[in-house]
Image (tube, rainbow, N blue to C red):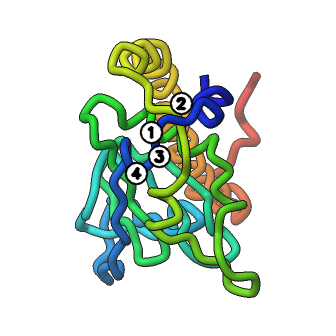
Amino acid sequence: MFPSILSDINGTVGDLVSFSNGKKRPNIEGNIPVYGGNGILAYTNKSNSQNCIIIGRVGAYCGSIYYSSQPCWISDNAISAQSKKGTAQLFSYYLLKNAFLPNRHIGTSQPLLTQGILTGIPCCIPNDDEINAFNDMCTPLQVMLDANIAENAQLSLLRDIILPKLMSGEIDVSDINL
């Protein structure tokens, strides 16, 4: 779908998606992820967005793209994207993911991606039936992907708790029979 949507042009990304810059992150720790240009960089107790698309705005990760279905904080090194059509958020994420954003920045020593660049990307504007068909096919896959990411995070946390205890001898596994 996306090779043709980026070639059969009848509008721009700005017709489908609105953009806003992130904000300086709060200093208070919590369990809500803080997204920067390189994905999750910390956790805080507040959110400034949810069900959003996060785009790296400046630096080495300019144009990198993430999707968060959960509440999150978007830092000032990123841009938040929201679909102008309520049901098209996942569609908009994959549209932007296939728009070669890392190649669209300005600047060489300090790459920068602006809202103006993003809104001006030419594309084909699909009708509601096409967006709904895309959502019907991809939403279950995205739910599974989100669940796998959450499980991997929990497993990494568990590993980080248990491994030092195994290494120090605090936990002894020598008596376990397999």
Residue type at tag 2: Leu
Residue type at tag 3: Thr
Q: Nearer the viewer, residue 16 or 162?
A: 16
Quadrant of the drawing holding the C terminus: top right
Task: Check disc 2: other Cα within 10 Å, few if <14, some if 14-19, many if 20+.
Answer: few
Q: What residue does disc 4 label?
A: 14
Pick whichever of labels 2 and 4 is earlier in the sequence: 4
Q: What residue does disc 3 label?
A: 12
Task: Check disc 3: other Cα within 10 Å, few if <14, some if 14-19, many if 20+.
Answer: some
Question: Could you tell whether 31 is left or right of 146 in the image?
Answer: left
Rounded to the nearest angstrom, the CA distance separating label 2 from label 3 is 28 Å
Q: What residue does disc 1 label?
A: 92
Rounded to the nearest angstrom, the CA distance separating label 1 from label 3 is 12 Å
Pick whichever of labels 4 and 1 is earlier in the sequence: 4
Horizontal and vertical percent for residue 31? 33, 60
Q: What residue does disc 2 label?
A: 145
Query: Marks 3 and 4: in contact by CB < 8 Å?
Result: yes
Task: Check disc 4: other Cα within 10 Å, few if <14, some if 14-19, many if 20+.
Answer: some
Is the residue 151 above or below the residue 38 in the image? above
Residue type at tag 1: Ser
Mark 3 residue element: strand
Is the residue 21 above or below the residue 165 in the image? below
Q: Residue at x 41, y 77 (%)?
A: 76
Question: Could you tell whether 34 is left or right of 109 in the image?
Answer: left
Q: Residue at x 30, y 67 (%)?
A: 30
Mark 2 residue element: helix
